[in-house]
Amino acid sequence: MAAKLGHLAQGAASVLCLLIFFVEPSDSRAQARISGGNGTCISRERDALLSFKAGLLDPAGRLSSWHGEDCCQWAGVRCSSRTGHVVKLDLRNNYVVSAFQGLYTMHYYKSNSLSLSRNEMSSSLVALQQLRYLDMSYNDFNHISIPAFMGSLQKLRYLNLSLSGFGGRIPSQLGNLSNLQYLDISGDYYNVLYTLDLSWLSHLSLLSYLDLTEVDLRAVRGWVHMVNGLSSLKVLRLVDCGLTSIVSATSKSNLTHLQVLDLSSNSFDATLEHNWFFWDLTSLKELHLSRCEWHGPIPEQLANMTSLEVIDFSANDLVGLIPNNLENLCSLKVLNFDDNNIDASIGEFMDRLPWCSWSTLQKLSMRNTTMTGNLPLEVGALGNLTLLSLGNNKLDGVLVKEHFSGLLNLEYLDLSDNSLKMDIEPNWIPPFRLKHINLESCTVGPRFPEWLRWQTRIDYLLLGNTSLDDVIPDWFWVTFSQASALDASENMLRGSLPSNLQHMSAISIGLERNNLTGLVPRLFPINITSLDLSSNSFSGSLPAELKAPQIFMLSLADNKITGTIPSSMCQLTSLARLDLSRNKLTGDVVQCWKESHNNSSVSRANSADQFGSRMYSLDLSNNGLSGEFPKFLQSASQLMFLDLSYNRFFGILPKWLPEKMPRLEILTVRSNMFSGRIPKNLTCLENLYYLDMAHNNISGSIPWLLSNLKAMRVIYKDANDYVYADSMPVITKGQTRDYTVGVFSQVVNVDLSCNSLTGHIPEQISLLIGLTSLDLSSNQLTSKIPNKIGDLKQLQSLDLSNNKFSGEIPSGLSALTYLSYLNLSYNNLSGPIPSGPQLQTLGNQIDIYIGNPGLCGHPISKNCSTSTTDAEQSVVHEDADHIAYLYLGMSIGFVVGLWTVFCTMLLRRTWAISYFQFVDKLYDEVYVRVAITRARLMKKTRKDAA
Ligand SMILES: *[C@@H]1O[C@H](CO)[C@@H](O)[C@H](O)[C@H]1NC(C)=O
Ligand SMILES: *[C@@H]1O[C@H](CO)[C@@H](O)[C@H](O)[C@H]1NC(C)=O
Ligand SMILES: *[C@@H]1O[C@H](CO)[C@@H](O)[C@H](O)[C@H]1NC(C)=O
Ligand SMILES: *[C@@H]1O[C@H](CO)[C@@H](O)[C@H](O)[C@H]1NC(C)=O
Ligand SMILES: *[C@@H]1O[C@H](CO)[C@@H](O)[C@H](O)[C@H]1NC(C)=O
């Protein structure tokens, strides 16, 4: 599995694409072959169907019509009108609501799927000997193997088991289905089907459609040879099968009818031009070789494949332009060279596009291909183009309206991340009605582009960082009222937002980092799932009635919002991420408890629809909030990130904290007025690697069972090992730095400074070998500093100052080679200061040790052999006070806004790629899960690889 993940990680690095689709109802061609029966059901076959049904779970009641005599009338069953035999069984789950491809995985959200009640499938179906058509796709058959009995349904012409949750080895009995014309057993990432050889395929000589996507073929020898025998093949899909070579025994291809070949996501790691037995597949219409680790030039042999309509060579390492002999490729519709290294001017590229295909070309995608130069005006002649994606290149120059004048059919335009400047007069009326626009990081402003006013069909509008310095025009909210996603972040937009956005269809709005003022809209778009208004100057209070039943991400951080958090917030039960930090909110945090029944409230706290129950990130820091630790967090069993710092919370840290929020990774309550003890079981938080309780009034001792803090017992070598759900400011001595985007680094932190802790440091602290920063300063800790503290080899910062530690300084400290900040001042330490190269390199040497009259040796002037007088010590003390506190520029680093990164990547990549799909709706889970899944998988990949 490690290899598989690794391979995927590499291959799919550029793909973070979201696609959601609604599956079409079943195959109409197949239906035409078969007419409905009428009361002719054969009882033996009826019994077989009933027995099959009995082994299934059918929560949605899809088979509820399966009763009574006439099985030919049952849903999904068709009988021959001639013989009365069941000839078709269509159990496809047509309710695949959504699917998305993450970095590593494809996820399907299937509702209404059938699954098995026992762990095997009833073989009763064998009785359906006349069955010609069997479709079980998109169900969930519990990872069981494909039943071997399917091999005895000898009349089958059509077998579709795709994405139905089968796993394990493919039964070679499928080779008995010699009438088969259509075979789809494509799987998904989680249900790995495999086969050790493909010789069973050779009996399926009528096969015209074969899809083995995601079937593990790594063990198969000579797959080319096996496939080459299937001379009737028209469609062959072997996506992500672990194929590594295309070595063939025969040089001549037999696949003379092949029209669609998809070998994407295999690791061929070879030059494309030499590795081919396919070059004489001249009937080919679609050639998909995306993410295959091809390198070298784009081969000239393409010139003979004159039927080609679709060429997808994206995400490889191909270099150079397309060949200049393609003049006979006159049917081209789709060209996708995204994520390659073409490294030439776009002008030359356009010159090599076959002239005869200029009117047929519909999609031209050249994202991230290191293309240079000015966009030639001829682009406007691609009259049938619906998609033009040139984002993330090195294009420069000025775009004028003539560039677009001929693009009558354009729907999707991506010019983002180039040095392009749009210079289009305000009265231009575009010839197209776009659905997707991505102009991010181009210069579009300063004026808000008037021509957008005509783009009323916009679904996605991306204008982030486009130098807009203007008021958002009033028509914006009308013209784009049907759009799904609107982003104009990182500009200098001014003015206020309409107070009522309920008429908007938007599911995502990003206006963060602008200069917007006024109130937060009173009424949100009703389907909104993600709203980011952070880093503006919104003021006033929050709307009293927050209504956004599907919202999962709400950030109003870094504004000037005053007043209390309204209790209607409790209705936002879908929230996964809430960031209200850096405002001027006051008052108690709403508790979101229905007070009516005191007893039932506890059980209600666990129910799935409670506020907080889906939350994984909550940031309320830097406000004036007060009250006790928020009680609604008892429902927050998913929470990974919690920041309550810099408020006026008081009371104890509740005992239920670790139990109710078992997934916490980052917990900071810094600078509040919490009192009482550290909950003992806090050390049960296995995922916690960042704990900051500094500047409170916490007393009692440090819980000793530190060994449970597993996430602190790992050494993180690679910045990417860290898995965060959110951004946060990281405190290093005297400095708060806020890193919301872009910088990963390695922080494993325990900060309990400035409290009233007593007792000693538990010996077990030495197990937390991942710690990079430990601050226990300004407490009342006593006894010796454990000698084993020297085991914390990753420590970069250690502050034990202002306590009552006694005894000698452990010599192990001198072994901490990464230590760049140390403070042991104002304790009762005595004896010689250990020597060691690292200790010598630390900053102001005297500051480190001052206030420990019993210490002696370098760098303190007191010699260890003689005893110090009080007078001498006070001299040392005074000197130190006059030395400015030069805190070292610490290399601790900062946590990153993974969420931001993901969300951005997700949306933007989606918009870049989704043209091949139909992106109609974005569902809330998709965002959240992709972020988390990706993070999790990253972690796993690395562990596996290690
Ligand atoms: C089914 O009904 C149709 C008319 O409704 C009739 O023409 C056909 O013969 C019937 N088939 C059988 C097998 O009875
Ligand atoms: C081509 O297909 C035919 C019929 O399936 C088969 O007999 C022949 O061996 C195949 N040739 C090659 C080179 O695989
Ligand atoms: C195209 O096919 C012809 C005939 O098979 C062959 O001679 C020629 O070399 C091919 N051209 C390319 C560019 O491969
Ligand atoms: C751009 O393409 C290169 C391959 O040429 C790939 O390695 C890189 O990850 C791509 N960058 C992005 C942002 O997709
Ligand atoms: C678009 O393609 C069709 C044929 O597919 C052609 O008839 C038409 O002229 C093309 N339109 C333009 C503007 O080139």
Image: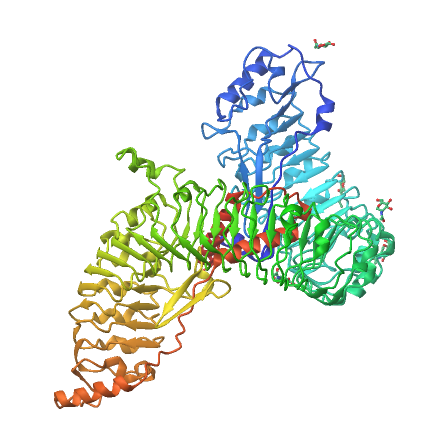
What is the basis of the colouring in this image? Answer: rainbow
Query: Left or right of 262: which side holds 835?
Result: left
Residue 584 lies, in percent from the top left, at 40, 58
Relative to 150, residue 248 above or below? below
Please report the residue visible at 77 percent of the width from the left and 64 percent of the height from the top. 375
In-front residue for pair 577/538: 538
* In the depicted structure, whether residue 336 falls above or below residue 79: below
Nearer-the-camera pick, 541 or 787: 541
- Which image quarter: residue 905? bottom right
- From what the image shows, is residue 805 above or below residue 691? below
Horizontal and vertical percent for residue 205?
Answer: 72, 35
Nearest to the observer: residue 455 or residue 745: 455
Q: Quadrant of residue 836?
A: bottom left
Residue 858 in sight here:
no
- Left/right placement of residue 903 relative to residue 755 reads right
Q: Look at the image and tell me in which quarter the C terminus lies.
A: bottom left
**Which residue is rendered at x = 78% and y = 46% of the image?**
284
Question: Where is residue 760 drawn, in percent x and y?
Answer: 18, 65
Q: Is residue 573 left or right of residue 110?
A: left
Q: Measured from the top left, where is residue 52 in percent x and y?
A: 52, 22
User: Can the viewer see residue 190?
Assistant: yes
Q: Determine whether, in the image, residue 549 is placed left or right of residue 732.
A: right
- So how many labels did they put on this image? 0
